[in-house]
Amino acid sequence: MPARHRPPSVTLAALIRLRGPTCGQPARPSPPTWQHGHVTAATHSTLFPRVPDSADAVLEGLDPEQREVATALHGPVCVLAGAGTGKTRAITHRIAYGVRAGIVHPSSVLAVTFTNRAAGEMRGRLRQLGAQGVQARTFHSAALRQLQYFWPKAIGGSLPRLVDRKIQLVVDAAAACRIRLDRGELRDATAEIEWSKVTQTVPSDYALAAAKAGRAIPRDPAEIAQLYAAYEDLKRQRGVIDFEDVLLLTVAVLQDRHDIAEQVRAQYQHFVVDEYQDVSPLQQRLLELWLGERDNLCVVGDASQTIYSFTGATPDHLLDFRTRHPGATVVKLVRDYRSTPQVVHLANGLLSQARGRAADHRLELVSQRGPGPEPGYAEYPDEPAEAEGAARRIRELLDAGVPAAEIAVLVRTNAQSETYEQALADRGIPYQLRGAERFFDRPEVRKAGVALRGAARFGGNDTLLEDTVDLPSQVRAVLSGEGWTPQPPAGSGAVRERWESLAALVHLAQDFAAAQSGATLADLVAELDERASAQHAPTVQGVTLASLHSAKGLEWDVVFLVGVAEGMMPITYAKTDEQIEEERRLLYVGVTRARERLHVSWALSRSPGGRPSRRPSRFLDGLRPGSGAAAGRGGSGGSGGIERGFTGAAVAGAPVERRRTQRTPARCRVCGRTLTDAGEMKLMRCEECPSDMDEGLYERLRDWRAVQASQAGQPAFCVFTDKTLMAIAETVPEEEGELARIPGVGVRKLNRYGADVLAICAGQDVGGDEEGD
């Protein structure tokens, strides 16, 4: 059995041991349709938008495919979303529409993503759409909350302490095994342990699994396996758990304690998973346990943005979604609102040369923006000259009025950062390092929050506010006491970074006052509290310096992609075809971060005076001027559109019939009124409209359901709800396709109960003592 499909290696018996120690194309013109009218940009929205006044208002401004996502509230939904196509917009509007229409209760929704920043952004957007109360968390955050709550019931006592960093444990485990590791080997060995755990590989299976996965192992596989085993023993002896254990233990509890699993499933009925191409086998298993037999799942991803496979992430779950859920609605988002046609053309060109399974499912983006400048390419003799060239261009942009916060320098490795930090500082250019301390956790931001809260409390009695006339001037007055000045301090370093933090709060106050007429200091403090809770940080006015991996999910007007040379892109240790393709996807992510201008550069040597042996990245062949024809795949990538669910033949194993259609609103089949209530949508009629239900059939279905529920040890509604049984008794389906179209009959229930239900509808006897499987 492949490692990614193995059941988790942790069981409740193992949990108990934790309690005690043990031993080339022209730009396409945008068609003059809806996108030139009132439709808003997908990704660059205003800071403080007005809360929509109705459910229908939530749908305003969405393009046809985004609207399809927002209104597809039942059954499995797969959203294949290209870069810059508004995926977060689509799924947050989907959740908000369901909540505002009364179809979905906010507390029954669990939206999961991969970073606290993304989860915070999602919560912030939902709040702006009037959909408070929805849980938007990372996989680990959601699992940890459940584990903390259920641990006393499942195991007893309190949850073992969670270690923030596992490096020291790995050091101690290596010492116990008498294995000497240098700094690089220590980091790599730790990564191997993390990969093993998220792929559910136990120490005894590590060598075989690593070889099969083509891992670049830093030491002998037997040594890594020994180190891994010693690490796990050490954790048990000290009564601690690590980051990966949070998922493993939650999976173990939900697998072994059906009562706890049912309690979790009773809480959450609707699931949304963002960045689904990055899920690991362990995260997928946890998602399956959360779902149970239900299929109210919406996943969003892009296989062409899979850049974390070294951590155990795999796009297979996204690419196989339609196979696992034949009845799924698949929506493809390809309208790129972020980047100009010139940037999009380069991005599409990169993927046109790709190989492998992810490349077979690539999406060809279509820019919705006006034309911009062509990407620029520059070659330098060495890396310091390249950094100086980038800093010089950035200074020119700043002098021309481009905001520093709208410029980014993206590097392949963090080790490249220091050269660019020095070059930016030499020209007096403010910058921020992406991935550094979270904004609201910075000491100066905490102190500023206390000062603003105190000023809001004392109001007119605060002497600082005597000469202020509006909210922005009040904020400037208060923060002047914390170190803010109208002009930034000279140079760089800690003083400049503190000023940038305070300046971000001043800019936020100005935007808030402009958006909320009559807003008070107390209102701003409440807004800051909301943002701190959601980790929705304001923009810091500095050039962003970040790695390509940490730039995922972000965007800027101007992007400098530096170090795009062989040995760095692709990186030297990328040897296999799969690793090379992941490097190509990483460059694709970098390209698609740019809205308007893109600068690509490389150096011929590392140091001044060095031998000029480097060459531009092979990924640019055929794309940059003078590099010859591209060795592309030919043809075009996947276009946008909507693919609706299965037919009866598809369920029986025949190929799925795919159709691109536009979903129409659910209407009462008696009076024709638009339906929004979930129960009415299941019946496909208004509650007050006359029913043509076969009462005898309904009673036979209820009797059959009671037997099935008893045998499974579940409540009756877990088999089918009363409304679903009523819909079946009104429709009286004769074949699988008809039954599958009834809301509440997902593919899993169709496979499990479909034969019985169709037999009962046909007037046949169904043995009451037989399993429903």
Image (spheres, rainbow, N blue to C red):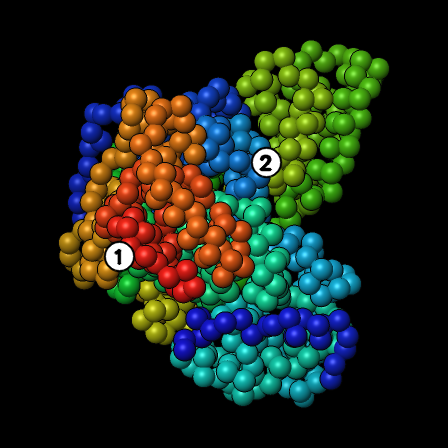
Q: Secondary structure at mark 1?
A: helix
Residue at horizontal 60 percent and vertical 28 percent from the top: 508
N-terminal label among 1 and 2: 2
- Of residue 326 and residue 359, the one placed in the foreground of this image is 326
Left or right of residue 438: residue 734: left
Q: State whether residue 683 is above or below residue 442.
A: above
- Whether residue 665 is visible here, answered yes or no, is no
User: What residue is shown with label 2?
Assistant: 133
- Of residue 318 and residue 254, the one placed in the foreground of this image is 254
Give the foreground label among 1 and 2: 1
- Of residue 583 and residue 212, the one placed in the foreground of this image is 212
Which amino acid lies under the numbered mark 2 shown in the image of this protein?
A: Gly
User: What residue is shown with label 1?
Assistant: 651
Residue at horizontal 77 percent and vertical 32 percent from the top: 450
What percent of the width, then of the height, locates residue 494?
Answer: 69, 45
Dividing the picture into quarters, in which one does residue 688 lie?
Answer: top left
- Whole-Å distance between the Cαs marked 1 and 2? 37 Å
- Of residue 82 and residue 733, the one placed in the foreground of this image is 733
What percent of the width, then of the height, locates residue 88?
Answer: 44, 40
Which amino acid lies under the numbered mark 1 shown in the image of this protein?
A: Val
Q: Which quarter of the figure is the C terminus placed in? A: bottom left
What percent of the width, then of the height, locates residue 430?
Answer: 57, 41
Q: Which mark, by number, is residue 328?
A: none
